[in-house]
Image: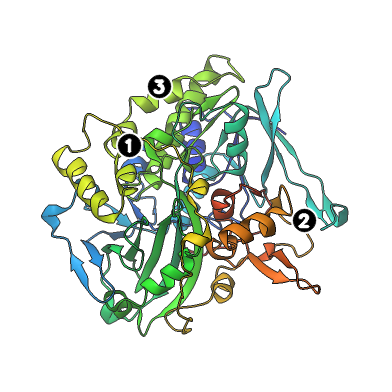
Amino acid sequence: MEYDVVIVGGGPAGLSAAIKIKQLNADISVVVLEKGGELGAHILSGAVMDPKALTELIPNWKELGAPLNTPVTEDRVLFLSETKAYKTPNFMLPKCFENHGNYVISLGNVVRWLGQQAEALGVEIFPGFTGAEVLYNDDGSVKGVATGNMGVKRDGEPGPDFQLGMELHGKYTLFAEGARGHLGKQLMAKFDLNKGKDPQSYGIGIKELWEIDPAKHQPGLVIHTTGWPLDSKTYGGSFLYHLENNQVMIGYVVGLDYENPYLSPYEEFQRYKTHPEIRTFLEGGKRISYGARAITAGGLQSLPKLVFPGGALIGCDAGFLNMSRIKGSHAAIKSGMLAAESVVEALGAGRTGDELASYPTAFEQSWLHEELHVARNVKPWLKKGLYLGSLMTGIDQIIFRGKAPWTLHHSTPDHACLRPASEFAPINYPKPDGKLTFDRLSSVFISNTNHAEDQPIHLTLKDASVPVNVNLAKFAGPESRYCPAGVYEFVKTDEGQDRLQINAQNCVHCKTCDIKDPTQNIVWITPEGGGGPNYPNM
């Protein structure tokens, strides 16, 4: 199928790019591929949204019914000890923590609304189709993508409902797959897009949606915490956002540069909910949904080259998230718009398959670049530990206002930060109580995750011997702990030998294993389209 523009990923970046292209030239043909069963099915974010970019894209979004219904009414930043909470006075908060004028949203619902706007403009959207393979022209430029075959059996043979994938060819292809995109990772390697850049840094965000007692509900209340339950050397923190309809979004982010292989981000999140300051909101409430997703956190220093012959990276596929503000959706929308403008300009000049050089140039001249430049030192400082990191972040953001005459760098990718288990003691996590804290499998159940039972396993190993011989022997099997969905477990064979069992059916597509596996032996590839979680309003 031939299009002017192919967009891989139906999140805020991909849909905003599609909308902007159609706004500028309605005659340009645009298709959006989305691997989730519907738009929003795989979207997971905090989220407090800065409407700045959305207002630029669709100025009358309020009149059109965009689901930004809950303005932020109060910011609280708490430092937690095991039993106490200490509120940071507002005058001591850097500007990046101020949320006045922002909205507590379900990003999944905003994406569904963006999809309606895109379709009204004539964008074709194919949910349930994965971008499984990058296609190239003879000159090496990107030609488009192929979607995955459907109905393939576990042994790789076609099943009774087999359906061949499609080739989608575009004059330009935009990749908007979100953090650690499967194809984006391949493009970075092929075109050496990370040359001269810091390695990308990630966090894992784990989130639950709760319906709470109306008496405890304060629409627009935004709470962030640092400190307990993590130790002071490990980067992480929580969010608790009050939506409409007596709902709260509660979640925990752990930097994937942690050292201790016994640490479990999922269990740390469950522990966090038992803190007296936090449990008071949840007691008497009901958990509705659960999910997890990796977050790009490297900032400006880790942004790859954005363009290559025939296409570009946008949104979190490139890593535009502003870690200091814990916000990525406005950055995704803006990056999609900038790439769209470059595409329309190129097509208008009769060009095809070349580098969209005006896109990175426009980014460097945009408010988004300025915002990321101001935030550039926050994550590197926080790598220095909670206390020194918080102090230096305060100096960087309050005294220098992000304009310090230096830029900090890091050179170690997250997977290389893990240290041998022999240097640490195992962490004894409490058993879940089924009311406030839960096990992984009951959590995965309410993420509505499903994959066709007999399809090939999409969590592939370069070397099947490495999980036992290296990961288990040296690092005590960290994949059984960093995965928030119980995909990886070490079991005994009948002969009493250890082996890694991969429960791919449970995978919520968070990409943590692809990032944190210390030997980079696990490679996440796209499963059959429509598989994975089905988030209603995350």
Q: Which residue is mark 3?
A: 361
Residue furthest to the left: 91
Pick out the residue farthest to the front.
Answer: 422
Which sits in the foreground, 161 or 18?
161
Residue 344, image x and y in percent? 50, 24
Disc 3 crowd rating (10 Å Cα; few below 14, some 14-19, many 20+) is: few
- Which residue corresponds to mark 1? 372
Q: Which is nearer the N-term, disc 2 or disc 3?
A: 3
Q: Quadrant of residue 302 in the image?
A: top left
Q: Name the residue type under label 1.
A: Leu
SS assignment at label 1: helix
Foreground residue among 217 and 425: 425
Instruction: Tell me where residue 387 sits by quadrant.
Output: bottom left
The amino acid sitting under disc 3 is: Thr
- Say whether disc 3 or disc 1 marks the residue closer to the N-terminus: 3
Q: Is residue 528 visible?
A: no
List the residue tagged with mark 2.
456
Residue at point 64%, 55% (across, down):
470
